[in-house]
Each structure stands twice: as C-alpha cells, then as structure tokens.
Amino acid sequence: MATRHTYASSDDLRDYLAGTSYSSGWTADGNAIRRILEAASVRIDQYVGGGTFGPVTETHYFDIGAGSLINSPQYYITLGTNQISTSEALASVIPLDGWLASPTTVTAYDDTDRGSSATLTEGYNADFFLMPYNVSPKTIFKLNEDTSNTLDAGQQTLSILGEWGFSSDTLSVTTADAVGSTTTTSVSVTSATNLGPAQTILVDAEQMYITAISGNTLTLERGVNGTTAATHSGGAAVSRYDYPALVVQACLDVSKLTFRNRDLGISTTIGSGEQSVTAAEGEIRSVLMTLDDYRTTATSNGVIF
C-alpha cells in the first residue's frame, strides 16, 4: 500500500525559497524536489511517532492480556495526583498505537475461534468510547462499563478499521472531469490553480497523489493511503488535504536544509563518538523539535499487559 502524505507541495517550496542564494537549483528537476519533500515528511512522521498527519485507511490489531479487560483490568491510570486501578475507575482502557482520525468498524474476536466475533458500536448506550473527548485525533479506546460485550484475552482479539492519522481535514478546490478508468494516471480538472505536485487529493472516497501537473491535467498515483481506485462522474469535487501550519513549516525547513547541505557539501561534525552529529543533522533536529507538542506516548505494538 502506497502511503502518500507530503506536507508541502513543490510550489510551496519554490515560493519559500524565492530570492535565496540557492533558489535557482530548485527549478531544474521537479522530481528531485518532490522526493526531498517526501523524505522530509517521512522524517517528520518518524520523529513525531503518531502516524501520518493525513488519513490512511487501514486496520490495526491489538493483543489483550490475561482476562477480559472489563473484569480484569491490566494496569493503572493517574487521576489528579492519585494512581488508581482501572477496576476502581470502572474503566477498561487501551492506548492506541497511533492517531485515529475516524473509526469505521471495531471488532472483538473470540480468543479461541477467529470466526466468532462481535461488531462493537461507539456511544453512551453502546460498547465503547474514544478519547480524549471533544477533540481529535483519538488516542485511547475505552470499553463502556455498561456494555455486555467483553474483550477476550489473546492475540489480535480486537481490531479497529478506520482512517488512522492526525486529521482528515480537506479543502475543496476544484472539480474533476469524468474518470472512466481505475488505471488511468492522468485526470483533468476544471482548474489546477490551487493544486501542486506532492499534494494528496480526495475525489469521492479515493485518495490520489499528484506527481506532476501540466495545464489542468494532473499526473497521479491512484488509490493511495489504503483507498481503492474507482471511476468518478464528471463534476466530482476535488479536495486537497490540509495539514497543521507547524508541520507544513517544518517540512519546508527540513527540505530547504536537505537541499542546501547537498548543494554545499556541508559535513562539519559536532561532538565525538556515538554522540556526534553533523552540523546539518543538528539543524534538522532543531527544526523537528518545533513539533514536540505532537509527539505521542501511544504504545508501539498495541499489547496490553
């Protein structure tokens, strides 16, 4: 599955570097610009650790420790200055292994028979809640204390299918001509003014990744981020994914530094031994640290002990 969320477009980067001493080098090779932006976005995702800042449709599985969680909670939570067990709080809580923008299907499986399962529903008179309340993304699954469903101990006895990522925010920017094939990589739009290479767009339920633009014709990767390539009627809305301003700025800065360091051959080393880093890497880390508020404490593998 191709994961394609790049947090700034090629045009954004060219505009950002306009007037700098090394801006001319960016205009020569559009593919190189896009690859540097893609690499910068991966660096951001790896540093923050919560997934991507745009949605990816996929299923995450979770192992459950000994005993059904509602009857045998496995760890403690902090309430104010007091540490209390989840049984005292009447809460069965699972930290998710990434940001969840929107769930589609939540399934609880029997620990001995994978063919036996129950679909769980979200809400006060249902099976579970997603937390934190009132804000997105969600990072915690909480079993409703009043549900009749339990989570059996075992491997992958809970699954969550949905849009995983920080946000699914989009901005409608144009409309598309009819797309009669699921394999074509060339799609025409009414106006490409507000679109650029290295952007992810949404048409109906399909995400597409722009690799190049000529006039009002987009060259695309189809069905990215866990979506499925489909046909589309003429006039379908084309929406562009938008990302937090700090993330966009970090992507631009990391990309700028990457190009500058390649262009100038900067390799000065700071420190020594295992603690040493190049000056260039130190600058990039300083940029990434502006995103510390987004860093997640989600578990790395979804296992509850």
Image (cartoon, rainbow, N blue to C red):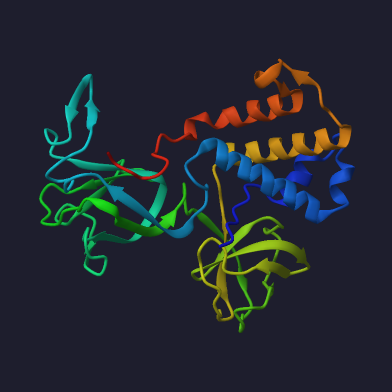
Query: Most extreme residue toward the bottom, as rendered?
Result: 180
Where is the N terminus found, in terms of image quarters?
Answer: bottom right
Q: Is residue 60 visible?
A: yes
Nearer to me, 33 or 179: 33
Seen at 67% across and 58% down, the residue is 194
Task: Name above or below for residue 229 compared with residue 137.
Answer: below
Quarter location, residue 195: bottom right
Q: Is residue 274 above or below residue 121?
A: above
Q: Is 69 or 146 nearer to us in this picture?
A: 69
Is 186 displayed left or right of 25 in the figure?
Answer: left
Viewer-nearest residue: 20 or 126 = 126
Side (left or right) of 12 relative to 158: right
- Picture coordinates of residue 50, whole percent (x, y): 47, 42
The quarter in which the C terminus is drawn is top left
Q: Is residue 192 above or below residue 236?
A: above
| Left or right of residue 69: residue 236 | right
Left or right for 170, reference 127: right
What residue is shown at x 61% (from left), y 59% (from top)? Answer: 200
Residue at image location 76% in from the left, 37% down from the top: 258
Q: Position of residue 162 (x, y in %)?
A: 39, 59
Count the marks: 0
Residue 180: x and y in percent read 61, 84
Quarter of the image where one finds residue 140: top left
